[in-house]
Amino acid sequence: MTPAYSPTKLASLAQREAASFTQTHPQSAQLAEQAKQYLYGGVPMHWMADWSTPFPLFVQEANGAHFKDVDGHSYADFCLGDTGCMFGHSPAPVAKVIAEHAAQGYTTMLPSEDAIAVGRDLSARFGLAFWQVATTATDANRWALRWARAVTGRKIILVFDGCYHGTVDETMVRLQNGKTVHRKGLKGQALDLTQYMRVVEFNDLAALKTALQTNDVAAVLCEPAMTNIGMVLPDVGFHAELRRLTREHGTLLIIDETHTISTGYGGYTKTFGLEPDLFVLGKPIAGGLPCSVFGVSAQVAQQMQTLKSNTHPDDHDGHGHSGMGTTLSANLFTMRAMRANLEEVMTEAAYQNMIPKAEYLAQGLKSVITKNQLPWCITQIGSRVEFQFSPKTPRTGHEAELAFDDELEQCIHLYLLNRGIMITPFHNMMLACTATQVADIDKLIHTLDAFIQELY
């Protein structure tokens, strides 16, 4: 719980900030009204209306660690597409190859030489033997789960409460009073997801052991550290025991690094020596273009091949009938961009630049929290930093959720936006990229301090 602040004062502050935003963003307001005529909710994806602003903020352009809106306001961007542009907007090497390749074809349903270079880089970087390319992390996770079920002959999937793996149906579940239930707000779900899903708390090894002991779980799908319900770090020894238990019970381990790739070169997997059977990475892999990858170990690849070889001819086996793949997956255009991003942007030097900036941000935020005697905490995973309304770092998704204060969070975000700073809208997460300036970090820290001074 945060220290006592006046709800009336918070409401008044939020009302003032909303009025200020409305007054200073007339062009966005006008475009928002126009958009309502054609777009559901006035936005091309409904969650784009979930920001703290009275109406959507329309962007004109973005570059590096900044973007400009249609009213001419410039912002220091610490959201960076919620990891989609984790290395900055329009990184020069990616922009260069996009411009060069724009007239050379986009998609042919055939591989290019770039695919070999990408596969070689991914194997060396993350340690998985073989790779496949998808369009989003949701796709990659969905296909990884299909392969896991296929090669194990099992149907059950286990996830951790509060997990984030895109919009894969199976992961739209939560833990409630010890039972797996559908996630609150889930729309249009016809099938009972709980029939083939199990949910346990992150860091709860006893519950994990119990859930696996029936030897019917195909795979555990896991973020190395939870990131979307508020950041939750693994306990010391958690991953080693997770790996031991999954192997003991014949369960595959799928590591989803879509957010924790911020940890360092090679992600959390390389940094901490994880040994997944399958590995998923989306958002930032192609410099901001829609693309994702999933890797499999040599052993899993052999199981996949054996499964295919043993399929009865009447089953019409083939990739076109596997339930995996879309026409635009691994298209020529995106593969070229991904290769440039891996070789020239997503480098060890980039992480050596980004992580110290994130550490500087984390220390600055800690100083503000200490000075104002707030029971908040700071969590950092490489270039990713978050402040949470909790006196200590949560150990489970449930603990992280208990720390939510939606009204306070929304007011903070709007206060920052009105002063030219954007952080991730759905929780208090920030990213530092190579283009992030120390001056912008200082501005974020001082502006948050100013907000606290006004409220408390």
Image (spheres, grey):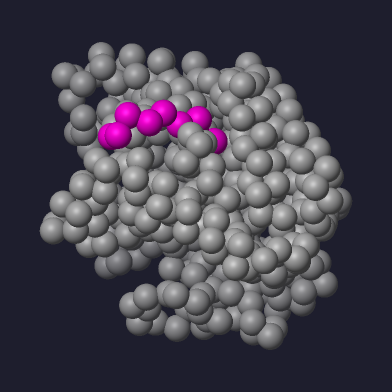
Q: Is residue 150 above or below residue 179?
A: above
Point out residue 230 in the picture as x, y percentages from the top left corner. 64, 56
176 relative to 438, above or below: below
Residue depicted at 34% across the width and 45% down the height: 23
- The question of residue 78 being in magenta is answered with yes
Q: Which is more toward the observer, 384 or 139?
A: 384
Q: How far across and how far down the image is residue 32, in percent?
A: 24, 51
Residue 384 seen anywhere in this rendered image of the structure: no
What is the span of residues highlighted in magenta in the rendered image? 70-79
Residue at image point 35% right, 65% down: 312
Choose top left, top right, bottom left or bottom right for residue 273.
Answer: top right
Determine the main secondary structure of the stretch shown in magenta. loop
> What residue is rendered at 67% in x and 66% in y?
6
Q: Nearer the viewer, residue 3 or 50?
A: 3
From the top left corner, tell me how far across and down residue 302 is, in percent.
Answer: 54, 48
Seen in the image, is 349 located left or right of residue 135? right
Q: Is residue 454 magenta?
A: no
Instruction: Give the side of residue 290 with respect to residue 320, left or right.
Output: right
Q: Quadrant of the N terminus?
A: bottom right
Residue at 41% from the left image edge and 58% from the top image edge: 50
Q: Is residue 442 above or below residue 24?
A: above
**Is the C terminus in the top left, top right, bottom left or bottom right quadrant?**
bottom right
Q: Position of residue 82 (x, y in %)?
A: 49, 43
**Horizontal relation, residue 161 to residue 345: left or right:** right
